[in-house]
Amino acid sequence: MDSRTACNSEDSKTEIAGSKIANRASVEWLSLALESAKMQAYLWDLKTNVILRSDQSSVETRIDSDHDSWTYLEGTEYAHPDDLQAIQEQINQAIKTHDDFRLEYRIRTSTGEIRWRLAKGRPIYNKQGEATHVFSVTQDITERKEDELLLKKQKRELEIAKQQLTFTLDAAGIFAVTNLQLGYKMRCPELCRIFGIEDENTELDQEFLRSRIHPDDRERMRGEVESNILHGGLFEHEYRVVLPSGEVRWLFAKGTRTFESGVFATVQDLTSRKEMEQQIIQKNHELELARKKVEETSNILNSIMATSVDNIYVKDRSGRIVYCNPITLKRIGKTEDDLYGKNDVEFLGPGNGGEEILRTDEWIMNTGAGKSVEEWITWCDGARRLYLSEKAPQRDASGNIIGLIGISRDITERKNIEEQIKRKNQELSRVNEKLKRFAAIVAHDLKNPLASMSMGADLLNRAKSMIEVDKRSKVIKDIADRMANLIDELLLFASSETEEVKIKEPVRIHDLMNIVKSNLASAIRQSHAKVEISNNLPEVFGNPILLLQLFQNLIANGIKFQSERSPILKVTSQDAGTQIVITISDNGLGISAANVSEVFEPFRRFHSNIQGNGLGLSICKKIVEQHGGEIWVESKMGIGSQFSFTLPKGKPGSDI
């Protein structure tokens, strides 16, 4: 054995020795405690039926001290026969239920003396749950039992003594010890204190007491007291008395009739209790009113929730829905189980607006501020709707934010209408702006000819020969013709502002161009113009009168805005699905790049040396737009211009 092993062995011996000393000390301390408390300890081995006892047991039971144990059967010989069955039943019940037991029972000592014992104990079980022992501690309680018997005896004697005394009850119901033969006089320290009488032994007579009872209680008390005196038995009365200061106090009298000549009763001041009861009644009344108010408010809120056309909902601090009104469930086709406990992303799905809603809700709950916000939501059926939501934080009774309450209204249709109105207003603003500009230009273009006519008229008045008169008259007529032409174009421009063309039909472009060439024959001949028309021009669908004006304006412009060379105009077409692209090109003066964007604006003129009102191309643009098409221009100065526009094809099945 090495030194380490030897050392460990010595340590183990020392530890064992220490444990034995500690156990011996614990046993001695327990024995000393039992002896000091006059208690005994027993350990009953259920397998062997042997009962082990502590050293004090033999002294109290007067059992032969040569034995420190006995069998259960030997032990039962000391138990009182009337208590043995109850002892066995309670111990068996404790073993069955695994509970502690407490017994009071009698034993007979070896001298034949009867003594009372109090036993407290508990069963002890092995690992398999089987009861193996019963441990108990007993104490002699004979003196306590004797004291209890003595107390009961004294109470009986006191009751007998009370019955031998005489008591009285006056007609007003104030109770005190006296004799009925003395004319309802009594002594009662409590009543003296209540009425402020310093001498507690003062006799209180019937008249004094009756005068102090509250007027509203006198008749009731007189009848009840007379009935008690007549019939006897227990009685209780509550009534009011009025003190000399005018203060009203409540009294409570309780007693019993003892003999023909008197009663025994007590008096107690109930004023504080009555005041408290009144406060409780008032509080209960207030609570009942508050309860009814809450109930009414709750009914109103429930009605609002049930009938509201808006979505009303409550969310917890995590943004999960904990309540919503019936219309919300019906509108989105969900049940409470589908919706409750989920946030917006979970029941809407990712990317359908739930993420932004969660961010808004979190901001409201973090800041404690309400918010009005428009929220786009895409529902499960793909419908995208816009909601105006009013949200506010929800707080508990302590003011802590525990969630939010929201009301959302579908404003999709309203928003669409607002957008339409906005667009219409913007369009109206543009039209008004055009109208202002139009009015200014018209005023300018009409004013100048009128001024010229006025000047011509003055010159005409001063003419000295017919030749001069003819010359001036011709100038005035030219001016009048130009004004008439301007007015005609203004009327045509105004009519082209109409948004809808009511009369539409298939129109052959070849036929239109033949009419155009006929109408412009004089201008074509004088300018030596050449108009080339493609052989495969199709049929379009539209208003023939407006389309004639469209083609005639563009051909006329191509002839009018020319340099020294003879005009050459070409009309071609190209298929574009449901539409036809028509192109009219010329070899005229052309338009600068800076002016191309304004070429279709009314009254825009870029060649001051050529007469015109600046309305022709504006009218062309309106006519094309009325047919659902577009018009544009490509041009180079000195080379020419190419105007292109789209028109709808002829009706399906028409002869192209």
Image: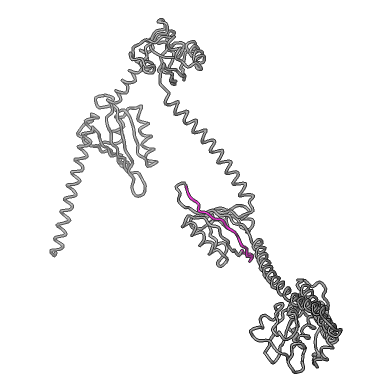
Single out the residue that lies furthest toward the right: 466
Q: Nearer the viewer, residue 483 or 528?
A: 483
Q: Nearer the viewer, residue 437 or 61?
A: 437
Q: Nearer the viewer, residue 6 or 183?
A: 183
What's drawn in magenta, residue-wise?
A: 379-396
Q: Quadrant of residue 613?
A: bottom right
Single out the residue that lies furthest toward the bottom: 565
Secondary structure mainly formed by the magenta segment: strand
Q: Is residue 491 left or right of residue 339?
A: right
Quarter of the image containing the C terminus?
A: bottom right
Q: Quadrant of residue 614?
A: bottom right
x, y (%) of residue 286? 51, 34
x, y (%) of residue 54? 23, 37
x, y (%) of residue 435? 71, 71
- Determine the residue positioned at 40% across, 5% down: 182
Single out the residue that lies furthest toward the top: 181
x, y (%) of residue 421? 67, 64
Residue 488 vertical position relative to residue 347 in the rendered view, above or below: below
Q: Is residue 250 left or right of residue 201?
A: right
Residue 388 in magenta?
A: yes
Residue 628 visible in the picture: no
Residue 652 vertical position relative to residue 54 in the rendered view, above or below: below
Quarter of the image containing the N terminus?
A: bottom left
Residue 329 vertical position relative to residue 145 in the rendered view, above or below: below
- Determine the residue positioned at 56% across, 67% down: 351
Q: Quadrant of residue 336?
A: bottom right
- Determine the residue positioned at 59% across, 46% down: 301
Q: Is residue 319 left or right of residue 122?
A: right
Residue 250 in magenta?
A: no
